[in-house]
């Protein structure tokens, strides 16, 4: 899965079990009382592979495995964050994610027979330092977003975005350099 090769996501018992366990913890996090910040942080630290000292994820939050997510210091994600982490998803320092965003490393083959057999692939996502992701953004498999970037609301990021720019659109493209 993490090597970028096709893998069996739908029928592999080990992966199904890992996703089920992770989603149960996500559900636990999402149903905790909002004012119970310490307990919510504790559950997130059980889900996510590497968390910094200072981070916040507002409920609801869903991910597939958790063990492929790395958060940098001063990470903030607003409500309804989805990270499909079949491959690593790495966030730098000072990353702010607006509501209703999705980071998906998983993709499906164009070949119908492979797709119907439950095969998929995964490509890592990397988000640099000092990045602001606007509301409703989707980041697709294999994308790297550089440092000091703002991604406009509603964008579909399907290719790398260089450092020091504002990017937006469907598909997302550089609007201006900073």
Image: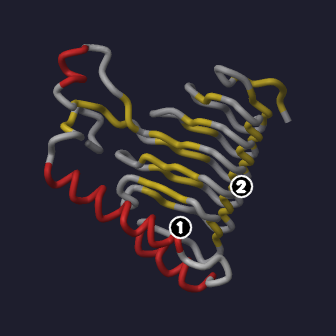
Tag 2 secondary structure: strand
24 left or right of 72 in image? left
- The answer to which of marks 2 and 1 sits earlier in the sequence is 1
Residue that label 1 marks: 30
Q: Is residue 19 left or right of residue 118?
A: right
Residue 170 position within the rendered picture, expressed as x and y whole percent measured from the top left? 67, 21
Q: Nearer the viewer, residue 68 or 135?
A: 135
Residue 114 vs 104, above or below: the answer is above
The disc at residue 114 is none
Residue, x 77% and y 40% (percent of image)?
A: 150
Front: mark 2 or 1: 1
Callout 2: few (<14), some (14-19), or many (20+) C-alpha neighbours within 10 Å? many
Quarter the C terminus occupies: top right
Residue 144 lies, in percent from the top left, at 56, 37
Residue located 24% across and 14% down the image: 112
Here the colouring is secondary structure
């Amino acid at each position: 899965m993490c090597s970028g090769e096709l893998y069996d996501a739908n029928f592999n018992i080990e992966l199904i079990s890992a996703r089920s366990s992770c989603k149960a913890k996500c559900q636990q996090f999402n149903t905790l009382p909002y004012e119970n910040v310490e307990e919510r942080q504790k559950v997130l630290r059980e889900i996510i592979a590497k968390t910094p000292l200072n981070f916040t994820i507002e409920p609801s939050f869903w991910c597939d495995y958790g063990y492929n997510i790395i958060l940098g210091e001063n990470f903030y994600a607003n409500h309804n964050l989805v990270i499909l982490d079949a491959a690593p998803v790495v966030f730098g320092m000072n990353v702010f994610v607006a509501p209703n965003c999705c980071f998906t490393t998983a993709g499906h083959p164009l070949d119908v027979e492979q797709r119907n057999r439950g095969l998929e692939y995964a490509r890592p996502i990397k988000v640099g330092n000092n990045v602001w992701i606007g509301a409703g953004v989707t980041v697709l498999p294999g994308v790297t977003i550089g440092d000091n970037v703002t991604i406009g609301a509603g964008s579909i990021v399907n290719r790398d975005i260089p450092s020091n720019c504002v990017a937006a659109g469907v598909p997302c493209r550089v609007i201006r350099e900073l």
